Every structure is written in structure tokens, then in C-alpha cells.
Amino acid sequence: MFKKLTRRRSLYLGLGALTALGTFAGNGELKRQRIFAAYDPQRDFSVVGGDSLKKRAASKGIIYGAAIRHDHLKEDAKLAAAVANECGILVPEWAFKWSVSQKPLRPNPDSFDFSAADEMLKFANTHGMLFRGHTLVWHESLPKWFGDRVNQQNAKQILEKHIKTVVGRYAGKIHSWDVVNEAIEPVDGRSDGLRKTPWLELLGTDYIDYSFRLAAAADPDAMLVYNDYGLDYDTRKHEAKRTAVLKLLEGLKSRGTPIHALGIQAHLDGEATDFNPTKLREFLRNVANLGLKIMITELDVTDKKLPLDTTVRDHIIAKAYEDYLNVVLEETAVIAVLTWGLSDKYTWLSEFQPRADKAQVRPLLLDAGMNRKLAWNAIARAFDKSLRKNRS
Ligand code: XIL
């Protein structure tokens, strides 16, 4: 069964691991080998002391935090305590989107419901956390009324009203805004790499510059971020995205558009084998050379196709976190790391990347009981190992 493994790799595996991997009925030999390559039971994930992630990060001049849903924060005291303990920055997973769930920010073209965002800001203030906004301009989470009411005649006005009202209301209280989210999609076939979105169709290519200028006017102190995914791996798709994002950023900078940082979502894949530190470092350097900061904005690691055994799964996930952060934190332009959620109890991946065996997904740092997992250790280790000094 394992005959294609090298002797060294076979030696890495204890009996327990063999049993765990044996639960892979139906998967091919190649896949099993890839998992073996990622699973090293000898790998050390130990950490010194019990300090929180925010403290470890801050001692290196880095901000650590997470995206959390307002309803979860309100209803789950254990989650709230963990957020207050671990996070130096908070971002609402839903509250600033035009429309998600029963409590949209934009219930109709004329009104705004800030109650969820306000609750989260209050929580952040109470616990001495920074607060960030996600996101002003995105092709998803648009309300139903958008399609009926927005047209080429009024689109500019509606965008202007949205950004002025939302950014203006929180001016001085926000660390950073994801002004535009996911505007690049080379697969859409345009030579500029722009995604074909309603905003592009309504306003033309200028909509990105325009949004940043509006945000800067409404809050001159907030860090303004362009945020995107699919930038992490050594694949043709990710390479094309990196190239197009860089081109977009260069264009924005050359026109004097007020943009201050790139947000790299970093939704990682525990199964991925095409992580290339050299290419990632080079991309980060290119972004930094434009005079931009970098934030890792939505870090998590999907375990959709990993073995069921939680020991094996948690090791592979922890490795993905630590290997990625070790590379990313070498770049001094990287100022913050945020995970998209904190506990496996609440993660978008249980809906968006569920496992075929229906087992609970484990992509985050804390388990469903809010206990620290190996992934927590991995992130703590990356902060501890970072050679950066506190620059604040
Ligand atoms: C996701 C949320 O986590 C889900 O709850 C929501 O229904 C859809 O959006 N990239 C982003 C985030 O920029 O806004 C997405 O969040 C995850 C991918």
C-alpha cells in the first residue's frame, strides 16, 4: 500500500499515523503521497509560555486579529472572551457588507442600518482593539434592490452616497478599509485583468480609483486597502492574478490615487503542494516597492480534502499556517495578520468548503470549545520567530 514512499518518509510515520492515513479508502496513491509529504509527526509545534497572539504579534510590531460575525459575538460569551483575549484588531465578517443575512447594512436604496457594525465597534473599543472595515465595493453581497434600482445614470451617485455615509460615519474610528474587494479576475478575459462586475459595467474602469478617492475624502486617516484572493501559490492562475493585481496597484499609484495597502486574503489549502516561498517573497517585495503596506486579511486553511483523523489534519493545517507566515513575515511591509474567524465553531468554510464525510471542518486556531489547537501554536511560533522588532 505504501510502497512508493521513500524510506525517510516511512520512518517519519508512527503506527498511529499509518492507521490514520489508512482511513483514506478510495483515494489514489498519488494523493496519499502528497499528504504524507505534508504530514510530519516529528515536526515541533511547541510554544513558550501562554501569551495571547495579540501580545506576541505586538511585541514584533505586528497586529493580529480576526473577522467575527456580530451575531456570534453577541450570542456566544466564550467566543467573545476568546476574541477579547487573542485579538488586537476586529473586523466584522458581515456588518459592513451591503447585504448579508437578515440584517443588511443597506436594506433599501435610501437607508442604512448601522446597528450591527456599531455593536462591534463598541466591543472593539471596550477591549482596546483596533477596528477595520470590510468592504465598500464588491461584486458579491449586493442587495436584491441593487439590480432593480441601480443603472448607468444613478450608479455614481449611489456609490458616492454609500462610501461618504459609511466611511464618514466611522471616520477616525477605523484602522483600515477594504475599499475595493476582489476586482481582479484574469479568467474573465479582459486585457487589464479586471473582473466583470456590476460596478465595472455601470461605471467603467474608473470605479476603483473613484472609490478610493471618495474613501480618502470621507476619512483622511484610515488606511485604504485593495483586497483580493488567489495570490499565494505557484500556479498559473495565481501567477496571472499576482501579475494583474500588481498592474492594478501600479496604475493606482501612478495616478496618485490614495491607496495605502494591499490586503492578501490568504485562504490557504491544506492540500496544496505548490507553495513557493521565493515567488511569494518576490511578489510581496514588488508590492512593498510601490510604497504600499501589506495586510494578510482573511487567513484560514481549508481541510476539505484532508484525512479525517484530527491529529493528522491538525498537523497539516498547522504546517500550512506556519510555513506561510514564516515567509510573509520576512517582508517588513506586512503590518497585520487577520484570520477569517477564530474558532472552528464558526467558519464560513463549513458552508463553502464542507467535507465529503460531513465531519466538522477544522480550519482555524481554536477548536469548537475555544481551546487552542496546533494551528494556534503555528501562528504563535511564526510571530515569536519573526526577527522584527517592535517599531511602534
Ligand atoms: C464570506 C463570509 O465569511 C460568509 O459568511 C458570507 O456569506 C460570504 O462572504 N472573501 C471575502 C469575504 O472577502 O467577504 C468572504 O466572506 C470570504 C471570501
Image: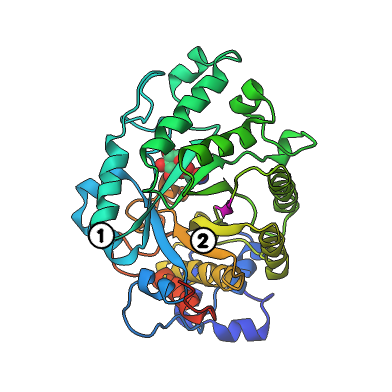
Residue 79 quadrant: bottom left
Q: Is residue 29 visible?
A: yes
Crowding at dot 1, Cα within 10 Å, few <14 / some 14-19 / many 20+, comes out as: some
Report the amino acid beneath label 2: Leu
User: According to the image, label 2 marks what residue?
Assistant: 306
Residue 251: % across, % down: 73, 44
Magenta segment's dominant SS is strand
Q: Secondary structure at mark 1?
A: loop
Q: Is residue 153 above or below residue 213?
A: above
Which element is circle 2 on? loop
Work out whether residue 158 or residue 108 is closer to the camera in this orientation and state it: 158
Q: Residue at x 42, y 77 (%)?
A: 59
**Mark 2 or mark 1, which has the lower sequence index?**
1
Reply yes or no: does residue 336 show up in magenta: no
Q: Is residue 307 left or right of residue 341?
A: right
Q: Which mark is residue 79?
A: none
| Residue for point 36% across, 73% down | 55
- Please give the range of residues in magenta: 260-264
Asked if the residue at tag 1 contacts the one at tag 2, i.e. Cβ–Cβ closer than 8 Å, the answer is no
Q: Residue at x 35, y 62 (%)?
A: 87
**x, y percentage for residue 363?**
44, 59
Amino acid carrying mark 1 in the image: His
Query: Residue 225, percent across and down?
Result: 55, 48
Pointer 1 residue: 127
